[in-house]
Each structure stands twice: as C-alpha cells, then as structure tokens.
Image (spheres, helix red, strand yellow):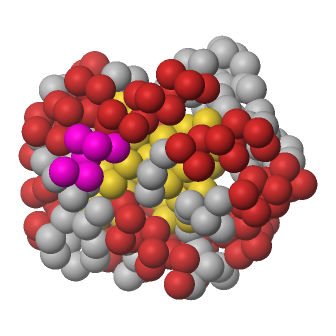
Amino acid sequence: MPLATLKTVLELADARKAACLGFVCQGWEDARAYTAAGEAVGAPVILSAGPGARANMPVRLWGEMFRELAAGAAVPVVAHLDHGGRLDECEAALEAGFSSVMIDGSALPLEENIALTRAVTAAAQARGVSVEAEVGTVGYQGGAPSEGTTLEEARIFAAETDVDALAISVGNLHLQTQDHAVIDWGRLAEIGGLTACPLVLHGGSGIRAEDRRRLARDHRVRKLNLGTELRQRFGGQIRAELEADPTLFDRSEIITRAEPALQALATELLRRSWTGS
Ligand SMILES: [Zn+2]
C-alpha cells in the first residue's frame, strides 16, 4: 500500500472515534513488527523516527526504510518525523520522503513557535506532507518539566497556524515507565472546544488503558505516541533470550527471537486503540 499522510489516517481514526498509535522506532526489526501489528489489526500504523533514532542513523535511511515497509504493507503506513526541532531538520525529512513531520517549537516563546510552525507547514504543504506541531510543553520523567497547554495559547496557535495535528500538554509526560499520568480532563475538553484540529498526546505509555479509550472516544485525541512500554517489552525479551541461551551471540538471531513478543504487545495495544475493546 502506498505511504499515507498523517492527515489521511487521522481522518480514518476520527470516523471511528479511535486513536492511531505513533510507534517510536529504533531500527528495522521494531518498525517491521509494528507494521505487522497494523496488518494483524487492520489498522493504520504511524512509524516515527525521533531525535534518538536520527542520532543513531541518518534520516535519509529512516525515510527509505519506512517507505519500503509502507510499500509492502496491507494497511496505510505513515512515515513520521517525531520532534523535528528546526526547519532544516524537517526539510531533510521532506527530502527523505517522509509523509508527515512534527515541528516541535514548544520550548520557544509562542510567537516564535507559530512562526517556525508556519515555515515548516509551507514547506510540507508544497509536497503534500502533513504537519504536527506542539503547544504547551510535554516534559520528560526525570527531566524537563511539563508546562500545561493554556487555553489562550491553544486558541492563538490554532488560529494562526494550519497544522494537521496538534500535540498538547494536559498531564501527559514522556518516558513514564508506569501508567500514572493524571489527565486534566477539563482543560482537554476546553482545548477541544477551541479547535477542530485532531489532538495528539505524547507520552502514551504513562496513560492508563481506560483513559486512552476515553481520550479517543470523548475528546478527539486521534494520535497517541507509544514508546516506553514497547521498548521495555523488547529490551526485556532480548535479555530473556540471552539468559535462556548463553551461547547466543549473533545480533540478528537475538533480535529476531525477541521480535514476536514485541509484535504481540504492539498488536494488543493497537487493537485496543483501534477497536475500543
Ligand atoms: Zn514526544
């Protein structure tokens, strides 16, 4: 199936009051497992290359890899740049054939975030590529704190930009290893009332399963980013395979043995998110 834009798959999600999952990828095997999970569920898949992934492998190769997976997939696959920090980073992703870019100007003053987002949107729209932006700041467990999205900045940002998805900060936090996030439902509802733009929450691993359903069903959250719980499963399974077989040394063999466990969890999470069950 050809590569899909973020806008396209978020519309599919909206029609069923579901959320797409943005899978944080670190290599070929996990990206392949997430694509297979999408095929098992019959749901679109958003393959994301974040700053860590891009520090480890050039963005051009990520684009090539995601497009290869999309071409062979039976479901829509989005090649998404996660947390692009500058215009040139997003332009490199456009050159690399990504179908969606996130420009994260959330640490900038609002006017600068708007200007940067508009510049990226102009470049992306010229190529038919979707844009996600962030207003308010989603922090990191053990790192930079969150700054919750205010109604005023959400209103101004939505009015002055033309993005396809808007990431907001309403109690969600990156890198949570347990699902302890306390969502500010009132703030979320108010932001949802200010814009028709599909909403995105990063830090999905910290959000309880019942809250994930409610976010999609009642609040137009159409993309949930998941990384930590899947990395925990994959890393844990790699450790288990090595402990089970002390003679194991081949990298491909180790990762291939661990891949089914990752694919099983991704399939379960995607089924819940896509079917609401
Ligand atoms: Zn994020």
Residue at position x 39%, y 24% in the image: 85
* Left-right relation of 112 to 64: right
Across and down, in percent, residue 55 comes to 28, 19
Of the 4 image quadrants, the one containing the N terminus is: bottom left
Residue at position x 11%, y 39% in the image: 95
Residue at position x 17%, y 31% in the image: 92
Q: Is residue 276 above or below residue 70?
A: below
Of the 4 image quadrants, the one containing the C terminus is: bottom right
* Left-right relation of 103 to 33: right
Q: Quadrant of residue 50?
A: top left
Q: Is residue 26 above or below residue 22?
A: above
Q: Is residue 9 above or below residue 254?
A: below
Residue at position x 55%, y 18% in the image: 108
* Left-right relation of 259 to 2: right
Across and down, in percent, residue 164 comes to 44, 57
Residues in magenta, as a range: 121-126
Across and down, in percent, residue 80 comes to 32, 48
- One can see residue 171 in this view: yes
- One can see residue 224 in this view: no
| Magenta stretch holds residue 76 | no
- Name the magenta segment's main secondary structure: helix
Q: Nearer the viewer, residue 81 or 232?
A: 81
Q: Quadrant of residue 44?
A: bottom left
Q: Nearer the viewer, residue 272 or 29?
A: 272
Q: Is residue 236 above or below residue 141?
A: below
